[in-house]
Amino acid sequence: MQLSATVLIIIITALSSFYAWKNYTFLSRSMFNPYQIKQKGQYDRFVLSGFIHKDGMHLLFNMITFYFFGRLVEQYLTYRFGGMVGIVVFVAFYVAAIVIADIPTFLKHKNNSHYQALGASGGTAAAVFASIILMPMADICLFGLLCLPGFILGILFLGYSAIKSKQENDSINHDAHLYGALFGIVFILVLSPESGLHFIDQVKNFSLF
């Protein structure tokens, strides 16, 4: 496995998650807690919470997804900006996605002292949807069984996340998924408007059969 910025982020996330599982003080201080952020000004939680996970399955799912889609975005950015600058832009993109994806959650729960969240879902969703804009027809497979063009699964995912974020009947931060995905889309379209035109052309000519 090539040691890219994507891989380094995965390693850092895995190590910090392992440490958090062994050290409750670190876990508690790193969790995304809007109330604590508001009351104590602990804005670093916006970033720290994206580098810890609830358990092994949570970590594995996010990091495997990020590995495949993060590499594509990193390669695109390094091609566009050159090696080191592209890597810096990619890391900034990932961290910004984690932060921005959690802003709606912060506004929604800033007076709720019991609400907490963690995980890299915002950054991972941003990488997935940036990739979908760049390569809308590339297949994305769910659990290796159902494979569909990325733009179709993307539409389904956005709709599902929007509905579930309003219901709030489970322990998943669907807002982070939704706004992380939207950030990834906007980021690529601002950076490369021609990608939007390419996306439209590809989707317009799509035929399921």
Image (cartoon, grey):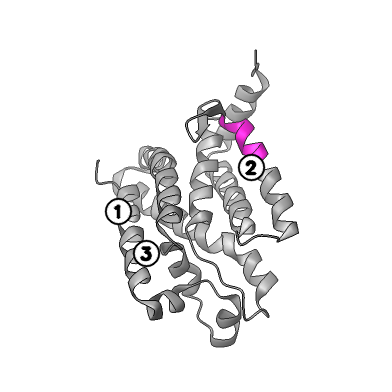
Name the quadrant containing residue 103. Answer: bottom right
In the rendered image, the vertical position of residue 162 relative to residue 44, given as above or below: above
Q: Position of residue 198 (x, y in %)?
A: 58, 27
Q: Are marks 1 and 3 in contact (CB under 8 Å)?
A: no
Q: Which mark is residue 8?
A: 1
For the residues labelled 1 and 3, the Cα–Cα distance comes to 14 Å
Q: Position of residue 110 (x, y in %)?
A: 65, 77
Q: Does dot 2 land on a helix, a strand or a loop?
A: helix
In the rendered image, the vertical position of residue 138 relative to residue 180, given as above or below: above
Residue shown at the point (58%, 64%) measured from the top left: 102
In the rendered image, the vertical position of residue 18 relative to residue 64, given as above or below: below
Q: Position of residue 59 (x, y in %)?
A: 41, 55
Q: Are marks 2 and 1 in contact (CB under 8 Å)?
A: no
- Dot 2 or dot 1: first in sequence order is 1
Q: Which mark is residue 157?
A: 2
Residue to which mark 3 is pinned: 17
Name the quadrant containing residue 40. Answer: bottom right
Give the residue at the far top of this rendering: 209
- Dot 1 or dot 3: first in sequence order is 1
For the residues labelled 2 and 1, the Cα–Cα distance comes to 27 Å
Q: Is residue 155 magenta?
A: yes
The span shown in magenta is: 149-156
Q: Amino acid at mark 1?
A: Leu
Q: Amino acid at mark 3?
A: Ser
Q: Does dot 1 land on a helix, a strand or a loop?
A: helix
How many circles with numbers are drawn on the protein? Answer: 3
